[in-house]
Image (spheres, helix red, strand yellow):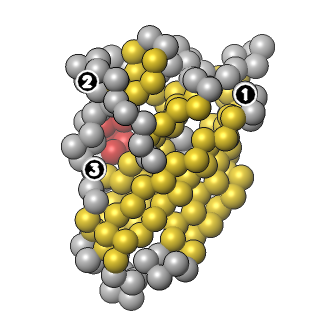
Amino acid sequence: MLVFCTTSHAFWHDKQGNPAPATESMRSIQDFGGSLIVTSDLDWQKKWNTPVEVTPEWHTVTTVKQGQEVVILTFFSNPKLNDERLANISCDIKVIQPDGVVASNHPDLVCFRGEIKGSTYNIYLAEPVMNFIGEPTDPIGMWTVEVTLKDNIRKVVLPMKTTFTLE
């Protein structure tokens, strides 16, 4: 289970306020933070649509069974805003099978464009949400999800990666 939140102007902290180390799936560059998770929480929208003071707890998974559905969520924090308090974040999303074949490749998607309500240091959900179901014809082994968040106003590129094993 993963719980994360931000406090003040430092990046990723756990629920107790302790700094969390940067990883391939949760990091920051130049005060722009991103996090990428694979969760078995199919009710993720209900968990996400709570008051800002409620921090959702996500059940992250590293192993997926054939036929099981999981959701891949991308979060960001502290995008640079223009004079109208608008953020402009795009992203590239790529899913790579265990045999190295690119199963899905989506460059330059809109991840978030619009007004940021509240603190920029709140955690925001990127628009592309991916569902994965391990089909019987899918190769068994380690799948890789690569997401590159791009804060187009700050001119920062934040590559992230996570993996899960299909069994």
Residue labelled with disc 3 = 60
Q: Are marks 1 and 2 in contact (CB under 8 Å)?
A: no
Q: Which residue is mark 1?
A: 154
The picture places residue 113, in percent across and down from the top left corner, at: 68, 34
Marks 1/2: CA–CA distance: 28 Å
Marks 1 and 3 sit apart, C-alpha to C-alpha, by 30 Å
Q: Where 93 falls versus 21 (above or below)?
A: below
- Residue 8 figure quarter: top left
Residue 59 seen in the current view: yes
Disc 2 to disc 3, how far (Cα)? 16 Å
Mark 2 falls on what kind of element? loop
Percent position of residue 36, x then y? 44, 46
**Quarter of the rendering occupied by the N terminus:** top left
Percent x, y of residue 103: 54, 75
- Look at the numbered discs 2 and 3 and tell me whether their residues touch, using CB distance below 8 Å: no
In terms of sequence position, does the residue under pointer 2 or pointer 3 come before the other?
A: 2
Residue 28 located left or right of residue 56: right
Q: Amino acid at mark 2?
A: Lys
| Residue that appears at 54% across and 41% down | 126
Q: Residues within 10 Å of mark 1 (few under 14, many from 20)?
A: some
Q: Looking at the image, is 46 positioned above or below residue 162?
A: above
In the picture provided, is 81 more to the left or to the right than 132? right
Report the side of 44 relative to 91 (left or right). Answer: left
